[in-house]
Amino acid sequence: MNFELTDDQRAIRETVGAFAAREIAPHAAEWDRNHTFPVDVFKALGEIGIMGMSVSERYGGAQLDAVSVAISIEELSRADAGVGVTVSVHAGLITRIIEGFASEALREAYLPKMCAGEWLGGFALTEAESGSDASGLRARAVRDGDHYVLDGRKQWVTNGGFAKAFVVFARTGQAGPKGISAFLVDRETPGLSLGRKTEKLGIHSSDTTDVLFEGARVPVDRLLGVEGEGYKIALASLGIGRLGIAAQSVGILAACLDTTQAYARDRRQFGVPIGHFQAVSFKIADMAVDLDAARLLLYRAAWMKDRDMPMLDASSKAKLFASTAARKHAAECVQVLGGYGYTTEFPAERYYRDAKITEIYEGTSEVQRIVIARALLGRL
């Protein structure tokens, strides 16, 4: 075993960490208050290669390994979890799907601008009646000559209000998973419109919007892969996406530890720093242990991805543990800061709000337990 990061991976951490400390962290509280989507930040991230970090160099990408991608999302989320999930969906899901399943012409048309951060990607899978049960989606795409006519409503589309390229899942055949196909749909497609913007508990710098399709005519060459294999694409993508959310969770947890440590050293009660008291110091020790454990699970799953090893249950373990730990220790961060932790003067309350969603999207914690149990027991 070798637990050391490579020189390149350490350089990625230093580069992204420095960018996040300089360009993101000073503005995170304001973006949170005003629900600001920081478009210029994503263009700047494109300039340093992060928006195309999963894409081959031939399309303008950085072609980073999965461990480096996880590190990048972790460092961004340490500064602002909303920025972290925006990049995770764009660079971890959408660009991967386009390169893996779109035609060469579409790759050449979309990926260079997406790698540059000029165009963003949105992932349109969830519907009102199909969340954890993605195979029950109702959006329909009907073949009409050299087009598909797409009708339906997608909700909770990350980056939806700003995306240029949507990966959309719709039913082209029978009920169930085998009747689902995936499409690359351009923002300018007639019949595509934006619905309500979702008001959320946290990750306010991330845009979440409903997307409507009403007779949208999508050219046949926008089909990703082959007809009827969209559900396989979705499942494979969600396995990768869970690494991104695990990385987001690790970033939130690392931020909690940073904030709690600093406060425990500076805050004095009864004549000594509060870190002197066992009740506080033990919370910090537990936080550090869970951060290490979450990172190890995340990096192991990413390492397995880099070696083309089966890693669906490993990514579920990483997401389950990291998201649970982030939510738990965000609460402890608020507790250590006491009254200040409950105010917007300190970032603890933002970590607390941001952490909860990591237990829900890209598969709830309950779904992760199902995946892990089936890997152990099969389908009984």
Image: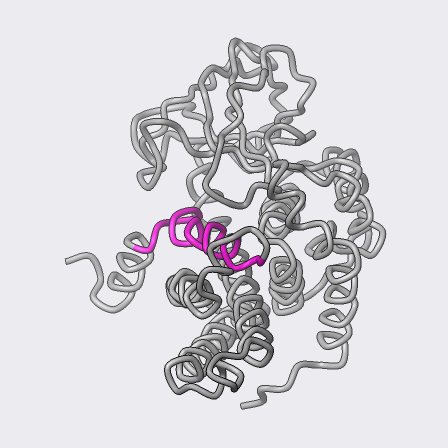
Q: Where on the picture, by quarter, is residue 176? A: top left
Model colouring = one colour
Image coords of residue 246 (percent x, y)? 49, 61
Q: Where on the picture, by quarter, is residue 282? A: bottom left
Give the vertical position of 77 relative to 280 (above or below): above
Q: Main secondary structure of the magenta part?
A: helix
Q: Is residue 117 left or right of residue 235?
A: right
Give the vertical position of 341 relative to 121 (above or below): below
Q: Is residue 278 left or right of residue 299?
A: left
Give the vertical position of 253 relative to 94 (above or below): below
Q: Nearer the viewer, residue 202 or 318?
A: 202
Image coords of residue 58 (percent x, y)? 82, 51
Q: Which residues are magenta?
A: 346-365
Q: Nearer the viewer, residue 5 or 40?
A: 40
Question: Is residue 272 inside the magenta stretch?
Answer: no
Question: Is residue 349 inside the magenta stretch?
Answer: yes
The C terminus lies in quadrant = bottom left
Q: Residue furthest left?
A: 380
Image coords of residue 44 (percent x, y)? 82, 49
Instruction: Tell me if I can see residue 322 in this picture.
Output: no
Instruction: Name the residue rendered at 28%, 60% in the picture.
Output: 369
Image coords of residue 296 (percent x, y)? 50, 77
Instruction: Name the residue rendered at 72%, 34% in the picture.
Output: 106
Q: Nearer the viewer, residue 311 or 22?
A: 22
Could you tell me how many numbered marks the image carries?
Answer: 0
Q: Where on the picture, by quarter, is residue 225? A: top right
Instruction: Tell me if I can see residue 334 in this picture.
Output: yes
Q: Is residue 267 left or right of residue 41?
A: left
Q: Nearer the viewer, residue 3 or 57?
A: 3
Give the vertical position of 150 relative to 262 (above or below): above
